[in-house]
Image (cartoon, rainbow, N blue to C red):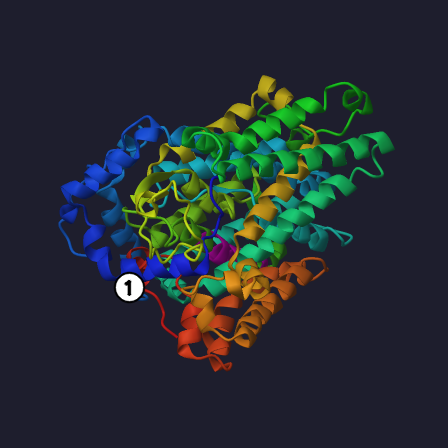
Amino acid sequence: MSAPISATRDARLNRSRKSSKSYDTSRDPTTQSTSANEQSRASEKDALNDISFRTPQRTSTPRQPPFLFGIGSGIVQDIRSRLLWYWSDWKDAYNYRVIPSIVLIFFANVLPGIAFSLDLIERTNQYGVSEVLLSSFMASFIFSIFGAQPLCIAGVTGPITVLNQTIYDITQRGSNPPNYLHFVGWVYLWGAILHWITAALNFCNFLKYVTLFSCDTFGFYVAWVYLQYGVQVVTRQFHSSSPAAYLTSIILALLMLATSFLFQGLSRTTLFHRHVRRFFADYGMPISLVATSGMAYWGRFNSANPATLPTGGAFTPAGGREWLVRFWDLDGKWVGIAFPFGVVLWVLFFFDHNVSSLIAQGSQFPLRKPPGFHYDFFLLGITTFIAGLLGLPAPNGLIPQAPIHTTSLLVMGQRRKSKDDPEDPDQTRTPSPELDPSLAVREVPVGVVEQRVSNLAQGSLCLVLLSGPFLHVLGLIPRGVLAGLFWYMGLDALLGNGITQKILYLFRDRALIPKNEPLNRVRKSRIMMFVAVQFVGFGATFAITQTVAAIGFPILIFLLVPLRTLVVPRLPFTQEELAVLDGPTASPFTMESVGGTHRS
């Protein structure tokens, strides 16, 4: 992971303000200048290939947002705007940045997806590793080939496994329970229908009310879920393994965590050549995973026999059932009972998937190609229906994998720094006499390799894993390494989260804080109040998932939006303070498809 998942508040707000002034020209391929193309091509020398910015000419002005209840207008606009770029989505993949992106996202997607499903697999006996891998492939295939936002990675998430597990606990406790997969098939069908209605009536326009307040709170929750699951992967072995086995798992988990952060730390230092540092950032986590897994089979680690991932037969569903789930055979009374669960699923996916898409297209990423929220949410309904038909966990947008994917595709270039660079935190430090500060340069994002191949390739690798030889290799990965991967991804997401950044600001030495830091314009008491409100939303969501009422956690996640829109403005904040503490998740160019950004 070459950069934190979320940029700091001031960087995001500055980019958002900048793009609000220039998005209508700088994003339009008809107005891209030759010098911009040359600068982008020059900055990619370290990436071995030259990214092509020769794109279809868009002759229309920035599109108007679709009217609410204008049936299908949002879907049609998304298809028309994105179709112009479809061929370039494949041509632009001829770039070295795609290779490390595929490797990184494959490991960051498939292994956490399997680990999230361990509880579901062991408790229900209705799902297996094959179902998780096939779900990830199905999502990547549909969204990379047909989707309007191929940068958004979809797969099996922690929230959907919690929801499926809760459905199992509720429906199977009676004396005459329904067939679980048949019942879930109807839940997914009801949810898919609601997805299609939402997309057709342009309800995705409500995303204009989703700001960094909601995204940071939800991202904070997801980060802690990753940390919690890492602990559970280890503690689950206490009663099923020998003391030597689970102590070995703990050592492997800590080793995975330490080596991953070591590579990340080296990539951010001034040591070695910049190509070497970028190699550490691109491949540090996969190398750590492979090396730590290999350690489990060396010497006394091997004799401890640590627990590994469970696997089944190649292309074989759990329990030897048929792949086709005939959910239409379910008794009629259960069909109606499945509807409220379908509503909960729809609420979860409406927020989770769309927020994943927003963060993957955040204002810190210099994107050029238009989004397509309405059309992609319609496609999500199709993948949800197919998941119910095949008995798979339903896929949706992944956090933090979606923004990690975009980050891995960043094209870095160098710009000259001036003495009064507003982003330089050390302006007061006396420069070295050997160096002229006017000649100092640093790498900044100058582009993103926006293409479809990396998403498709990482999903195709999931399908390859379903074959017998690769399933055997997958079964060799120790669960302790998986726990370390969870801790690494959770901590990395936590450190880059806006809530964490505000908390760290409160403890920073005032003498070392840059004078142009935006939070300097906000009273500390107001920063603490804003963070406290976010903690209330996070705490309520995290707490309910630990109880029998976990089925309602998507509702609490969705309520973060009206909490920010209706409640926070009534608290004693000034408009200037709210503008600093909060802001739009994506640039005006991205938000124009859902009616722009709400101003409160």
| Residue 343 visible in this rendered orientation of the protein | no
Which percent across, then down, holds residue 33? 15, 45
Left or right: residue 59 compared with residue 113: left
As helix, strand or loop, the secondary structure at mark 1 comes to loop
Q: Is residue 597 above or below residue 455?
A: below
The residue that label 1 is drawn on is 70
Which percent across, then down, holds residue 489? 58, 43
Q: Residue at x 53, y 36 (%)?
A: 266
Left or right: residue 331 compared with residue 375: right
Which percent across, then down, holds residue 169? 72, 52
Location of residue 254 (image quadrant): top right
Q: In this view, does 221 lie above or below 444?
A: below
Location of residue 198 (image quadrant): bottom left
Residue 351 on the magenta span: yes
Camera-nearest residue between 32 and 429:
429
| Residue 540 visible in this rendered orientation of the protein | yes
The C terminus appears in which quarter of the rendering?
bottom left
Q: Is the magenta stretch mostly helix, strand or loop?
A: helix
Camera-nearest residue between 78 and 326:
78
Left or right: residue 518 compared with residue 223: left
Camera-nearest residue between 58 and 423:
423
Location of residue 120 (image quadrant): top right
Amino acid type assigned to the residue bearing label 1 in the image = Gly
Q: Is residue 160 above or below residue 479?
A: below
Q: Is residue 555 above or below residue 425?
A: below
Which percent across, then down, holds residue 52? 24, 33
Question: Which segment is the magenta one?
Answer: 341-354
Q: Residues within 10 Å of mark 1 (few under 14, many from 20)?
A: few
